[in-house]
Amino acid sequence: MDALFPDQRKAIIGEFFVNDSRLKHISRKAYKKIAGWKASVGEPANGDSRLREQYDNLLRNSFFNAVPNSYILQRENFLERPLNN
């Protein structure tokens, strides 16, 4: 007699390992980028303080700006296709 719920543990375990390896790979790439950025900002070539200012301005103007919810909903076309969300 066939079981009502087939055993899918192997599929779930396989999916977990695939997702885990992808996450490790992405994390490793992000760590390398952050380490490279820290090295370039921490010790700018020839003591260039202008380069440091450019990095600080780039960070301040890109990562620390508040974005309203209405902007995100508009960019994702949420209001134009409410049934697909």
Image (spheres, rainbow, N blue to C red):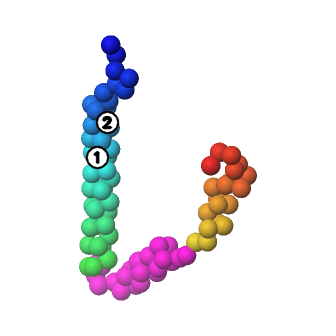
Q: Quadrant of residue 30?
A: bottom left
**Closer to us: 46 or 37:** 37
Against 7, is 82 above or below?
below
Residue 78 visible in the snapshot = yes
Say if mark 1 contacts mark 2, CB within 8 Å: no
Q: Residues in magenta?
A: 44-66
Q: Which residue is mark 1?
A: 20
Which residue is at 27% across, 56% downward?
28
Against 73, is 19 above or below?
above
**Closer to us: 6 or 68:** 6
Q: Position of residue 11 (x, y in %)?
A: 31, 31
Q: Position of residue 66 (x, y in %)?
A: 55, 76
On whether residue 60 falls in the magenta region, the answer is yes
Q: Which residue is mark 2?
A: 12
Against 56, is 9 above or below?
above
Q: Is residue 69 left or right of residue 28?
A: right
Residue 25 visible in the snapshot = no
Of helix, strand and loop, which one carries label 2? helix
